[in-house]
Image: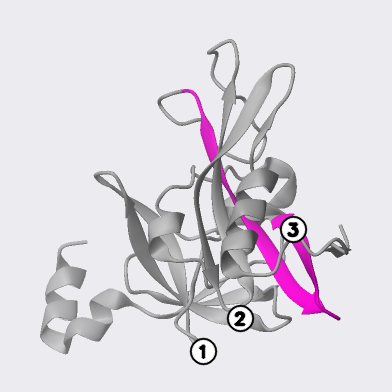
Amino acid sequence: MGWLFYTDGRVKSYADEKVEIARLCTFEGDTRKTELVKACKVGSTWYAAARVTNLDGTPVEDATYMTDPDGSITFGAVFLTRYDDGCWGYKDMEESAGPNESRAPLGLIELLSDLKDPDSYAQDWAAIPDYEEGDKIRLATPVTLTDGSTCQIVTATHYRRGRQKRRCYRIEETGGLVRLSKASLAGSELLSSAKGAASPVLAEYLAGRE
């Protein structure tokens, strides 16, 4: 989708923008409804967590997101914004569609449902390593961010959702966080291991226990 600009002057301030983002993330159709959970602005970009539920109470089935225990899914929406000749405009995208955005606050990321990995996107599942916390990785193909930059070297880390740890990756150049599907990790290589980085003695000890 391209840029959409408002020429009626209804959006002039941060407060106006937040109201409009909430409106864009709120919808009720014949079978489902979507409601804003949280929105925040970093630079000129708005990030939103939006929850989708079925009106009849049945679990939401989605090709991109895992269904949460309460039957809903919560997806991440990104709104690039700018003013042009006094008119506010936005370009929206859903996080899994790409390009990926890496400046969403951790508190918002923690609200999002887990991503599925459609088989059609992966060339060889057996070639996807199970990286550990702190492992530094080089992706086979650079990931493009919404500002046009790319990242290829990332470090495995995590965020918390409730009591569970969820995997994400820290970008080497900027320190920003991204959620990567297994398809994005296909063909990647380990540059340095978290085990080996601790100390030679600890690395030798851990190697002997494997």
State the residue at coordinates (43%, 48%).
111
> Compared to 88, does 71 lie above or below?
above
Circles 2 and 1, Cβ within 8 Å, touching? The answer is yes
Where is residue 20 drawn, in percent x and y?
67, 53
Disc 1 residue type? Glu
Where is residue 30 drawn, in percent x and y?
74, 17
Magenta range: 71-93
Q: Quadrant of residue 82?
A: bottom right
Residue behind mark 1: 173
Residue behind mark 3: 92
Query: As drawn, is 38 to the left or to the right of 139?
Result: left
Where is residue 133 drawn, in percent x and y?
32, 67
Residue behind mark 2: 151
Q: Nearer the viewer, residue 42 or 76?
A: 42
Based on the picture, tell me whether residue 86 belongs to the magenta stretch: yes
Circle 3: is it few (<14), some (14-19), or many (20+) Cα within 10 Å? some
Q: Main secondary structure of the magenta part?
A: strand
Disc 3 residue type? Asp
The CA distance from mark 3 to mark 2 is 21 Å
Circle 1: is it few (<14), some (14-19), or many (20+) Cα within 10 Å? few
Dot placed on the residue nearer the N-terminal end, 3 or 2: 3
